[in-house]
Image: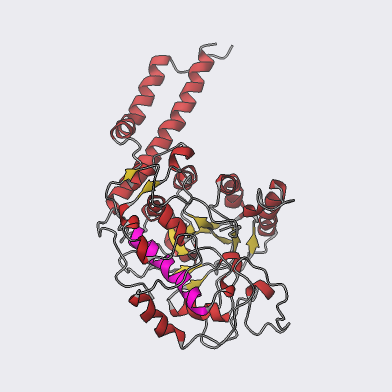
């Protein structure tokens, strides 16, 4: 019979020695669904996704389009009108395409693809003058640009905890309506050091909108993210990749660089598209991993489309992360891979350079992090209640005068919480090992 080298008393002494400070912190800082830090400690998805009223959002609702409805400029919004007027003259005269839900039936579009329409040909190099190419790869070899669409998801704590435990940052493409629904969850991305990009207000096919409404989809997403997190993104991803030179011109005029992808996990289709299985999603991940193993990214890296959409897509991301780590030399947020030092209009916030990040300095994101941290009251009759896009959404220049967030830097608090999470993970790990030893020794 195997005898454990630990006595029960010795094991407990080791556990307490390693984890006393962390355990004290856990007792001192219980989960609290009224602040970002408290919301981040919730572990029950049902509790995480209990709707709540967030005063900064509920008091501003009349200055936004209806949540999850296709956006238009809100009547009387002079800031939006002025920004649109400044952009409008440079937008190419390209008519809208198809419907909001992506029905392009009957569209007589030329085979020559004059509009560089990604949905038609996956074109990423604009044909209209003055527009820069879309971002679809990482310039560094053996590097994966890591990001997730359709957040913030109300039940993402386990996923974000996992990323924190791996010291892995990512680019989060947030839907404006989701940010209004789940503001504390959106704040966590900034606190954890992730990069936030825009994923439109209502998650529809962008080329189907009129130019003014396409502007509104981006404008109000920027405004929502600024309201809730205190930062204004400089990047975006069109839902379904649906972009042409008209939409590029609008987003470029707003200071947004377009981010697409080379590989598609199709994770969002599992459970929503008949015939798509989990094995199909696994195969999509594996194809990119095989290409990495075969040296396809020896000169230039790549990006894959994945989602924060639901528990399945996030679980897939966690399942494949160790395999991606083996296949790629580097896994980085998009901004880091492009050496974007200032990912937001607020230049006080900085990202580490690619060299800093891959050398292990992944936690050097600093600056703004100006979350609105005023306590809020949970309620079952919240003003903002939607947690998923409408059925038509299968997946999912800085607005002036839009911030209702308190200009309080939480970088110190965020760093302390990150250290606490790592300590908690260490305590749990040691506790598991020692518990196993104790159980074996008892037999």
Would you place residue 109 above or below residue 381 in this image? below
> Where residue 157 appears, x then y in whole percent?
45, 44
Give the mark count.
Answer: 0
> Where residue 119 appears, x then y in whole percent?
65, 72
Q: Is residue 222 magenta?
A: yes
Lateral position of residue 367 relative to residue 166, left or right: left
Lateral position of residue 149 relative to residue 355, left or right: right
Lateral position of residue 50 relative to residue 140, left or right: left
Instruction: Identify the coloring.
Output: secondary structure
Quadrant occupied by the C terminus: top right
- Residue 349, quarter of picture: bottom left
The answer to whether residue 300 is visible is no
Q: Is residue 40 magenta?
A: no
Q: Main secondary structure of the magenta part?
A: helix
The answer to whether residue 262 is visible is yes
- Residue 342, quarter of picture: bottom left
Quadrant occupied by the N terminus: top right
> Where residue 311 appears, x then y in whole percent?
56, 45
Q: Residue at x 42, y 57 (%)?
A: 179
Comparing 78 with 229, the one in front is: 78
> Where residue 307 appears, x then y in whole percent?
56, 54
Would you place residue 88 above or below residue 121 in this image? below
Would you place residue 346 above or below residue 312 in this image? below
Lateral position of residue 96 relative to residue 335, left or right: right
Q: Residue at x 28, y 33 (%)?
A: 28
Comparing 254 with 166, the one in front is: 254
Q: Which residues are magenta?
A: 211-231
């Amino acid at each position: 019979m195997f005898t454990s080298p630990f006595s029960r008393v010795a094991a407990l002494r080791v556990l307490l020695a390693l984890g006393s400070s962390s355990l004290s912190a856990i007792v001192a800082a219980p989960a609290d669904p009224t602040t970002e830090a408290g919301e981040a400690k919730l572990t029950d998805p049902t509790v995480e996704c209990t709707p709540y009223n967030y005063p900064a959002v509920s008091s501003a609702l009349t200055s936004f389009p209806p949540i999850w409805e296709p956006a238009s400029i809100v009547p009387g919004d002079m800031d939006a009108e002025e920004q649109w007027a400044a952009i409008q003259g440079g937008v190419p005269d390209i008519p809208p395409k198809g419907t909001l839900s992506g029905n392009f039936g009957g569209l007589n579009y030329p085979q020559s693809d004059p509009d560089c329409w990604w949905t038609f040909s996956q074109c990423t190099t604009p044909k209209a003058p003055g527009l820069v190419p879309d971002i679809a790869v990482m310039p560094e070899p053996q590097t994966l640009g890591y990001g997730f669409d359709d957040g913030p998801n109300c039940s993402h704590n386990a996923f974000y905890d996992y990323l924190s435990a791996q010291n892995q940052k990512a680019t989060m493409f947030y839907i404006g309506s989701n940010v209004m629904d789940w503001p504390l969850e959106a704040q966590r991305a900034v606190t954890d050091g992730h990069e936030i990009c825009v994923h439109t207000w209502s998650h529809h096919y962008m080329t189907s909108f009129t130019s003014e409404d396409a502007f509104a989809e981006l404008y109000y997403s920027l405004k929502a993210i600024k309201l809730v997190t205190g930062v204004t993104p400089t990047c975006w991803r069109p839902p379904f990749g649906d972009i042409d030179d008209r939409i590029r011109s609008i987003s470029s005029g707003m200071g947004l660089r377009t981010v697409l992808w080379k590989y598609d996990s199709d994770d969002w289709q599992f459970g929503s598209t008949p015939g798509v299985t989990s094995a199909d999603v696994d195969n999509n991940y594996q194809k990119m991993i095989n290409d990495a193993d075969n040296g396809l990214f020896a000169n230039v890296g790549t990006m894959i489309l994945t989602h924060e959409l639901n528990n399945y897509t996030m679980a897939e991301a966690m399942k494949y992360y160790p395999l991606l780590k083996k296949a790629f030399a580097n896994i980085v947020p998009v901004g880091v891979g492009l050496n974007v030092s200032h990912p937001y209009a607020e230049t006080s916030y900085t990202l580490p350079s690619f060299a800093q990040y891959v050398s292990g300095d992944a936690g050097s994101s600093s600056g703004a992090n100006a979350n609105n941290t005023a306590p809020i009251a949970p309620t079952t009759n919240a003003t903002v209640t939607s947690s998923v896009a409408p059925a038509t959404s299968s997946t999912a220049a800085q607005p002036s005068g839009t911030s209702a967030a308190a200009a309080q830097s939480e970088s110190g608090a965020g760093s302390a919480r990150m250290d606490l999470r790592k300590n908690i993970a260490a305590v749990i790990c040691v506790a598991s090992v020692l518990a196993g030893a104790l159980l074996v020794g008892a037999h």
